[in-house]
Amino acid sequence: AEMPTLRERRAKGLAILTETITSPTLGDQLQSLLKEMPEATWHQYEPVGRDNVRAGAKLAFGEYVDTIYHFDKADVVLSLDAEFLAGMPGSVRYARDFVDRRRVARTDAAAGAAPPTMSRLYAVESTPGLTGAAADHRLPLRASDVEELARALAARLSVAVAGDNSQAPRNVPADWLTALVADLESHRGDSLVIAGDGQPAAVHALVHAINRQLENVGQTVEYVAPVEVEPVDQLTSLRELVGSMKRGDVKLLVVLGGNPVYNAPAELEFAKAFENVDFRVHLAHDFDETSFLSHWHVPAAHELEAWGDARAFDGTATIQQPLISPLYGGRTAHDLLAMLAGHPERTTYQIIQQYWTRRLGSDGFLKRWNQAVHDGVVPGTRAESRSPDWKFADNISRANPAAARSSLGERTGLEITFGPDPTVWDGRFANSGWLQELPKPITKLTWDNAALFSPQTAKRLGVASHELVELSLAGKTLRAPVWIVPGQPDDSISLALGYGRTQCGRIGHGVGVNVGLLRPARHEWFAVGVELKSTGTRYPLSVTQNHHSMEGRDLVQITTLAEFAQRPEFIDIEHRHPAESPTLYPKYEESENAWGLVIDQTMCIGCNACVVACQAENNIPIVGKEQVAIGREMHWLRVDRYYRGPIDAPETYFQPVMCVHCENAPCELVCPVGATVHSHEGLNQMVYNRCVGTRYCSNNCPYKVRHFNFLNYDALFEYSGDEAPSLKLLRNPDVTVRSRGVMEKCTYCIQRINEAKIEAQKENRPVRDGEIVTACQQACPAQAIVFGNLRDRNSAVARLKESPLNYSLLGELNTLPRTTHLARIRNPHPSLEGPATADTPPVEPTAVDRFLNP
């Protein structure tokens, strides 16, 4: 009854709030609705937004443009607080391109090929992340100091910048900056500089100018028309909406996705203004904080059960086809907008097809539509390249550095940075048990966020890990637990968003602390002037890696590119191909297939995609925070994190470890009931219905990759027997028939192996190389994992096994593992790291290890 009245008054009092819109059809619907109802308003906001990126482009060019980076063409990369390997639009593509430019061990290398080359990465980070871990040179630096470094770098590269930038920025070693400038200068056209989303607009404008000065534009850097339907300053847009709500101008507010009651900056008091609206509608997947304060919560259809479309980071459009039948009668944003426009009878499918009929043309439309749906992309939709107007020189050369920083407040004192969580992001995934229990890549924390301190800052302030402290900023306070992290910049605290949810289902409710209560609206990413007070209370945190020291063992083999070129056989033969010692283990007959796997540690970026892919493939249960704290997490695959170097700025290394399927398997000999056995194809297999839970096999496993089901996890959620919904997956006969009291581990995705073998047998042929792809291999954005048949000497895995970088983990134990690793290769600048010699020591316990394990 309200809609005709709204249309009569040209929708005065109607406001629509969305997150960033990249769907062409949804954008077209919104714009059409605003033409029909000119008094209505459309606002956009999401907490991990890109306002600084947009503002930087506008400062440089006078218009919004998107930047696309070509890491596959870059020999030298500088990241200024940019987590481009995991947390930016296009990160999956960027990760693949970046590691491909650093791939040393290749399966397609011809005999006598030229020496391997690889790019070099310099990373400046305000909190330890994946990009810094992958860097050849990492510099911990407070977020508020990055602009000073960018200005100094621009000045040394002859970019006109106001002020005196002759002195080296504070906390930046002079030799580090000198080497960086020389490296960039010598790689004009094939270098790349990128700034993080959290850095101010001036830094982004400086980076645009630096890339232009280095002749990278058109080579490693490309500018395109914005992918967003309507690029706006989202924080300003949200402020305008809040102001309208407080004045009573908004009578009907439709929130399409997002959760602004939870994640809007606290000082805007969005919830209070929201309750001032006469009628509030929220479309969302879950009943969340915004739904709780809404009059009408509309359950949103899941992406897997609804038609839709979207644009990728480069503008390429895809038409999203439902993969399952609708389960619970959810609605899409298209449905809700059609209802607002007075056409409730139109379906989402009709709306999307009508839009693309106009784009693709009505003649022969059905053929082109079916082809686009089949291929997954709509041809010819990539964003148009732009040659923007360079207005930067005047804007920046006139800018007063002091004035540019004045909005940041006083730069001395304790700094606090805010950013998305590596697993639950901005809180939208907080009700996923898989993601809550997935360890953070660097800290290995689960089921919590924490205030990250550097060891030096923690010592100066007298705080320790697991201690609850009170943080105060601009009159707002927050209690958070402390976690000390090597490599965190001094005088800087990092807090992750996405926790402290109050309406989030049974998994995410009340987990962690809501950092948004402290986050200022003026500077959403960092602020200076936080005050700290100890509460004298302990807050237990659960991590999955308690044993950080290698105890003198060479678990991660590391060398530099220069040393590898000088001495390719730097790994001794006992690590590469351990000779089989005399043993009582039985010999197994050779078969047509001998499965094996190789993990390239140079390619691995530590993102944990493989871990959660394995969990999804094999229905691995979560165990909860208390069980993780006592070492009972169930992940069949883990990514260990190791440090080397000084405690204030150590090098970080990742090593994925799963069951290595030993030829001489220590677990098999000690099982009293023959539950763990050796297959004729070399797999170490578990017969679940034989296992009686002695756990002898786990005690005897040197890799600690076997996991025991201690509890009936469904009973924890007040279910019993077959009534538990999760048991429908837990007892999937394709994967497992396991239950409480059974040992579990990696199976090389035996279900996938058998499926491929059956298909090959039906076609009377052998299994082709690459036909079997394990779940971890399939999910890896860096292609760091290769699986195949070792009997096929031409297979990719067999060729990698012959690489001089290949070695067996703990091979000295005579286990003869089928899973091996390739050594990590670094490419440091010669002037920043001494020349490699034959006596360069392997990874040893360092100050970091001694600090973490006193």
Image: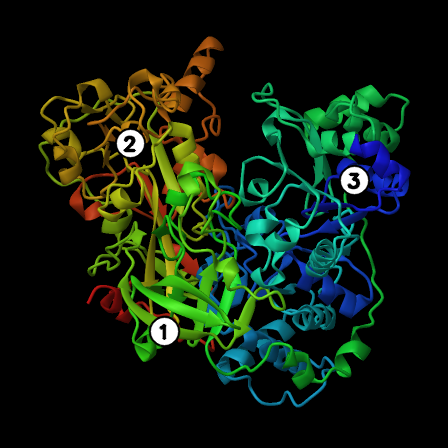
Q: Give percent across and percent down for residue 166.
A: 62, 89
Residue 533 disc label = 1
Residue 57 vs 800, above or below: the answer is below
User: Few, some or many C-alpha atoms within 10 Å of disc 2 (few <14, some 14-19, many ≥20)?
Assistant: few
Color theme of the render:
rainbow
Q: Give percent across and percent down for residue 783.
A: 49, 42
User: Few, some or many C-alpha atoms within 10 Å of disc 1 (few <14, some 14-19, many ≥20)?
Assistant: few
Amino acid on which disc 2 is placed = Leu
Q: Secondary structure at mark 2?
A: helix
Q: Give the residue at x 34% y 36%.
A: 622
Give left or right: position of 169 versus 540.
right
- Judging depth in this view, the residue of 501 and 176 nearest the camera is 501
Which of the image's four quarters has the N terminus?
top right
First in sequence: mark 2 or mark 3?
Answer: 3
Task: Kindly indicate whether the residue at mark 3 contacts the one at mark 2 (C-beta within 8 angstroms).
Answer: no
Q: Give percent across and percent down for residue 652.
A: 38, 61
First in sequence: mark 1 or mark 2?
Answer: 1
Q: Give percent across and percent down for residue 155.
A: 67, 82
Q: Give the residue at x 10% y 35%.
A: 583
Residue 300 vs 416, above or below: the answer is above
Q: Secondary structure at mark 3?
A: loop
- Judging depth in this view, the residue of 832 and 38 nearest the camera is 38
Q: Which residue is mark 2?
A: 716
Q: Mark 1 to mark 2: distance in Å?
A: 37 Å
Amino acid on which disc 3 is placed = Thr
Give left or right: position of 4 versus 709.
right
Residue 381 disc label = 3
First in sequence: mark 3 or mark 1?
Answer: 3
Residue 187 disc label = none
